[in-house]
């Protein structure tokens, strides 16, 4: 199949990393794949090109999600996309995230591309301040042939207004490392891999740590707008000897086998890559019961789930894992086995099957 994957840009982010992994796995399965960042490239462009996957740049201006609100830029990109698809004639396109969907899906419909998939990657509450989002979403869903998502929570979120559009959960993909962590080793070390944003819950984790009788060492890996607040909180709470903030790490997944457990106390999520990567590395996970997290973390088996914002429950979960090496080991092993169901090969198969099924339904209609 000729398959084009469309997204706003190729900056480093969860959806962007997933689209790169999917493109690579589809190409390895001998499909003709291109990636189209509508509003400019980004650091992940080189990674795709090194794998021989074409990256089609339609906009020579700086990337940025706000560009879609500028009618002139949107129309120019739409025109160039139409011209490109008239030449390429893909069998299927996937538009990832609403910013790309409101341009790519109508253009794909006009171009008579048989399979037009909306890739819903997060909850509707994560997209705020987007003008006429609901109206655009309803239009796009009527023009699509299938909605694909990484979680049931996102796919059946009523805020997305998908109507009767066929839907399929394909999950996130993850690399399964050869080397696994040994979480039962002492002393315990925790890790939180997340962009420094308010909804990720860094401050909740810090508050939970000071409630413990014995505080483990914890590394916070990520960067973002909350950096100054997080640094200040580490100092104010007297955690400078226990908590390190690592903002310059480019490949956190390669470091996970150095830790004993992973934490992600977010207030909302779709399917967080960091949780899957931790499980694949053999780490038990402590996370909040939000979005699609319960779909990948089985409470008491592969990790522990706590309510968002409940620092006391978070502290109890950390205390339980830090004091029970055998529990960490069993949860880590169970998590690694569960993560194997999210290998890139499996995700590519489910993705192709969902698109094929949508084509069958469309032909019958």
Image (cartoon, helix red, strand yellow):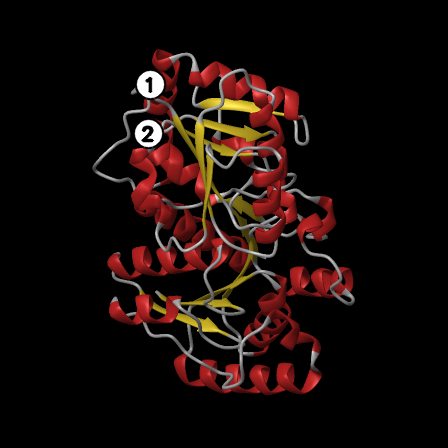
- Number of labels in the image equals 2
Q: State the image coordinates of residue 125 (x, y, percent, origin top left).
A: 71, 48
Q: Is residue 14 above or below residue 130?
A: above
Read off the residue under disc 2. Answer: 282
Is 270 on the left-hand or right-hand side of 300? Answer: right
Q: Residue 299: tell me if it is visible.
A: no
Q: Residue at x 42, y 73 (%)?
A: 90
Between 128 and 190, the one lying in front of the other is: 190
Q: Which residue is mark 1?
A: 329
Pointer 1 local density, CA inside 10 Å: few below 14, some 14–19, many at least 20: many
Using the image as rendered, state which of residue 301 and residue 315 is in the foreground. Answer: 315
Residue occupying image coordinates x 65% and y 47%: 198
The answer to which image quadrant residue 157 occupies is: top right
Q: Is residue 297 in view from this perspective? A: yes
Q: Secondary structure at mark 1?
A: helix
Residue 219 vertical position relative to residue 138 in the rendered view, above or below? above
- Residue 334: quarter of image: top left
Q: Are marks 1 and 2 in contact (CB under 8 Å)?
A: no
User: Which quadrant would the N terminus be assigned to in this image?
Assistant: bottom left
Instruction: Identify the residue shown where x is 33% and y is 24%.
Output: 183
Which residue is at a point 30% across and 34% down the rendered structure image?
258
Secondary structure under the numbered disc 2 in the rendered image: loop
Q: Earlier in the sequence, mark 1 or mark 2?
A: 2
Q: Residues within 10 Å of mark 2 (few under 14, many from 20)?
A: many
Residue 124 image offset from top left, x and y in percent = 69, 50
Query: Disc 1 versus disc 2: distance between alpha carbons?
Result: 8 Å
């Amino acid at each position: 199949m000729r398959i084009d994957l469309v997204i706003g840009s190729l900056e480093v982010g969860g959806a962007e990393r997933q689209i790169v992994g999917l493109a690579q796995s589809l190409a390895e399965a001998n499909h003709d794949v291109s990636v189209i960042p509508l509003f400019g490239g980004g650091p992940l462009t080189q990674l795709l090109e090194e794998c021989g996957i074409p990256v089609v740049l339609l906009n020579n201006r700086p990337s940025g999600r706000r560009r879609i609100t500028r009618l002139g830029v949107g129309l120019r990109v739409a025109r160039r996309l139409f011209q490109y698809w008239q030449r390429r004639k893909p069998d299927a396109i996937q538009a990832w995230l609403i910013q790309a969907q409101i341009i790519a899906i109508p253009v794909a419909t006009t171009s008579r591309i048989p399979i037009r998939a909306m890739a819903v990657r997060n909850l509707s509450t994560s997209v705020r301040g987007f003008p006429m989002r609901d109206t655009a979403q309803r239009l796009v869903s009527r023009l699509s042939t299938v909605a694909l998502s990484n979680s049931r929570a996102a796919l059946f979120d009523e805020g997305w207004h998908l109507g009767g559009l066929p839907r399929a959960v394909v999950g996130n993909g993850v690399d399964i490392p050869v080397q696994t962590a040994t979480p039962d080793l002492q002393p315990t070390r925790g890790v939180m891999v997340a962009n420094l944003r308010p909804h990720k819950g860094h401050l909740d984790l810090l508050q939970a740590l000071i409630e413990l009788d014995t505080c483990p060492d914890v590394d916070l890996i990520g960067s973002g707008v909350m950096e100054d607040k997080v640094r200040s909180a580490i100092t104010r709470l007297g955690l400078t000897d226990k908590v390190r903030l690592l903002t310059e790490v480019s490949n956190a997944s390669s470091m996970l086998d150095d830790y004993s457990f992973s934490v992600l106390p977010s207030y909302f999520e779709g399917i967080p890559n960091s949780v899957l990567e931790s499980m694949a590395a053999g780490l038990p996970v402590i996370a909040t019961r939000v979005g699609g997290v319960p779909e990948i973390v089985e409470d008491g088996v592969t990790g522990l789930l706590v309510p968002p914002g409940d620092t006391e429950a978070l502290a109890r979960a950390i205390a339980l894992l830090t004091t029970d090496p055998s529990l960490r080991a069993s949860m880590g092993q169970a998590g690694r086995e569960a993560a194997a169901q999210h290998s890139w090969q499996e995700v590519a198969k489910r993705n192709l099957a969902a698109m094929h099924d949508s084509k069958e339904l469309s032909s019958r209609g």
